[in-house]
Amino acid sequence: MSKDTYEPDIITLNYLAICDIVFDESLDVTIYGYTFQDKSEKIELELYSNLVTLKNIISCNKENGNKILDLISSSANFKKDEPINVDFEEPLDGPLIIENIELDVYSPYFQNEVGEWVPNEEMGYIIDDFRVMTN
C-alpha cells in the first residue's frame, strides 16, 4: 500500500436490520443496526451514508419501506445543531429488514504519525455501493 493512498477493504453485506437513523441538515446519515456473520453471529453496525442512498436502501423493503420513508419525511424539520433521530423499531415492532441487497461497506483509514494507513477504530463503516438482488 502506498503511503499516499490506500485501497479500502470492501466488505459485502447481504442482510441488514436497521434499528434507527440519525441525520441533520447536511443530509449525512448514520444508520444503526446489525447483520449476521455466517447466519448466526450478530454484529452491531454503525454505517455512514447520505440520505439518497438511505432512501434507496429502505425502498428495497417492499412491505415497510414506504412507511419508513413517510416517517423520515415527517421527521425532517431541521433545527440548527439538533440532529434528528428516527427510531424504526417502534412503528414496525422491530427493525427494518433488508435482505435483497448486496451492500458494500468499508472501514475508513487515516495516516498515523509515521505515514502508515491504519483503521479508524472509533468509526463505523462507510457505505460504498449497493446492488438490489433479483431472484
Image (spheres, helix red, strand yellow):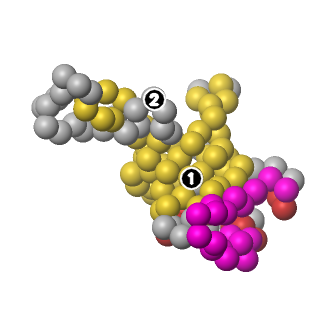
Of residue 63 and residue 83, the one placed in the foreground of this image is 83
Q: Residue at x 85, y 56 (%)?
A: 90
User: Split into 4 quadrants, where in the image is the N terminus?
Assistant: top left
Position of residue 15 in the picture relative to residue 121 (left or right) = right
Local secondary structure at mark 1: strand
Amino acid type, mark 1:
Thr
Dot 2 or dot 1: first in sequence order is 1
Looking at the picture, how far across and down is residue 31, in whole percent? 60, 51
Q: Say left or right for 3 vs 109.
A: left
- Residue at the spot 75% in from the left edge and 57% down from the top edge: 88
Q: Residues within 10 Å of mark 2 (few under 14, many from 20)?
A: few
Whether residue 56 appears in this view of the structure is no
- CA–CA distance in space, label 2 to label 1: 16 Å
Pointer 1 residue: 30
Tell me which residue sits at (59%, 27%) in the image.
Answer: 38
**Which range is magenta?**
69-90
Q: Quadrant of residue 107?
A: top left
Closer-to-camera residue (56/82): 82
Q: Amino acid at mark 2?
A: Glu
Q: Which residue is mark 2?
A: 121
The answer to which quarter of the image holds residue 75 is: bottom right
Q: Position of residue 29 (x, y in %)?
A: 54, 58
Counting from the top left corner in percent of width and height, residue 55 is at: 57, 68
- SS category of the residue bearing label 2: loop
Q: Nearer the viewer, residue 24 or 31?
A: 24
CA neighbours of label 1 inside 10 A, class few (<14), some (14 to 19), many (20+): many
In the image, residue 29 above or below residue 121: below
User: Residue 117 vs residue 98: left or right?
Assistant: left
Image marks 2 and 1: residues in contact by CB distance under 8 Å: no
Which residue is most to the front?
A: 80
Kindly indicate the quadrant of the structure image that contains residue 24.
bottom right
Name of the residue lying farthest toward the top: 114
